[in-house]
Amino acid sequence: MMRHPYRKLVQMELISLLFACIIGFSALVAGYIIIVFLSIYLVVLSLFCDAMILMYTRHSVEGGKQAVRGAMLLVFTTYFIFQL
């Protein structure tokens, strides 16, 4: 059985999205804003994994756009944490 060469990245992307959904929803219900930021960081991790997969599969323009989206979200989320 042949494995996908980027299987670990795909798994990490999907797992981080799943945890982001679960943690984000539970944080919104419980009312903890700091845990919402944790879920946003998990989305950033997912974006970076997707960017790496795209760059490795020779879709460098799309991968670059995903990396820039992830970096912007990381910077803005960190800024908002320090503004609390």
Image (cartoon, helix red, strand yellow):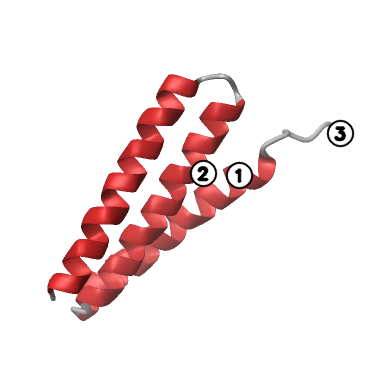
| Mark 3 in CB contact with mark 2 (< 8 angstroms) | no
Picture residue at 57% right of the left edge, 19% below the top: 58
User: Which residue is disc 3 drawn over?
Assistant: 1
Q: Quadrant of residue 41?
A: bottom left
| Relative height, residue 45 to residue 29 (above, below) | above
| Relative height, residue 83 to residue 71 (above, below) | below
15 sits to left or right of 79: right
User: Which residue is disc 2 drawn over?
Assistant: 49
Q: Amino acid at mark 2?
A: Cys
* Residue 49 drawn at (x, y percent): 51, 44
34 sits to left or right of 17: left
Decide which of tag 1 and tag 3 comes sooner along the chain.
3
Picture residue at 54% right of the left edge, 37% below the top: 52
Mark 3 secondary-structure assignment: loop
* Residue 83 drawn at (x, y percent): 13, 71
Mark 2 secondary-structure assignment: helix
| Mark 1 in CB contact with mark 2 (< 8 angstroms) | yes
Give the distance between the C-alpha atoms of the residues marked 3 and 2, in whole angstroms.
Answer: 24 Å
Give the distance between the C-alpha atoms of the residues marked 1 and 3, in whole angstroms.
Answer: 19 Å
Q: What is the crowding at mark 2: few (fewer than 14 residues within 10 Å), some, or many (at least 20)?
A: many
83 sits to left or right of 52: left
Quarter of the image where the C terminus is located: bottom left
* Residue 35 drawn at (x, y percent): 30, 74
- Which residue occupies the foreground of this view, 39 or 26? 39
- Which residue occupies the foreground of this view, 27 or 57? 57
User: Which residue is disc 1 drawn over?
Assistant: 9
Mark 1 secondary-structure assignment: helix
Picture residue at 67% right of the left edge, 37% below the top: 6
